[in-house]
Amino acid sequence: MANLRLKKYVSEVLENQLKANNPKEVSNTLNRLIKLGHEEKIAKEKIAAVLLIEIYDVLKTNTPYNEKRYIQNLKNLK
């Protein structure tokens, strides 16, 4: 049950990032992954996984959100 809530919240954050185009690399990554042949749903799941990694790192290390690291991880997606 908690996993479904977490997935919902992360999906909402991702959709908000896409709507706000902030950071712009999220929409760039989505478009790039779709051009590489990924279905939109799968591309969004990949991006959400990167977002989860960033959230986990922030919580684990008790450090601020690192946008540079987040963007680099988005660029690493294939």
Image: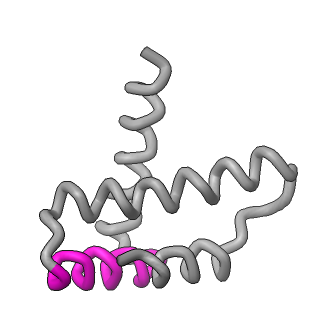
Q: In which quadrant of the rendered view does residue 33 lie?
A: bottom left
Depicted 52 relative to depicted 47: above or below: above
For the point 38% across and 57% down, the residue is 14
Q: In which quadrant of the rendered view does residue 46 lie?
A: bottom left
Depicted 3 relative to depicted 1: above or below: below
Check if residue 71 falls in the magenta segment.
Answer: no
The magenta-colored residue range is 22-36
Depicted 48 relative to depicted 69: above or below: above
Q: Point out residue 18 in the picture as x, y percentages from the top left corner.
A: 32, 68
Q: Point out residue 32 in the picture as x, y percentages from the top left corner.
A: 26, 84
For the point 17% across and 69% down, the residue is 38
Q: Is residue 72 left or right of residue 7?
A: right
Check if residue 33 falls in the magenta segment.
Answer: yes
Depicted 49 relative to depicted 77: above or below: above
For the point 29% across and 60% down, the residue is 44
Please name the colour scheme applied to the rendered image. one colour
Image quadrant where one finds the C terminus: bottom left
Q: In this view, does 54 lie to the left or right of 13?
A: right
Q: In this view, does 20 lie to the left or right of 63?
A: left
Image quadrant where one finds the N terminus: top left
User: Secondary structure of the magenta portion, mostly?
Assistant: helix
Could you tell me how many numbered marks the image carries? 0
For the point 60% across and 55% down, the residue is 53
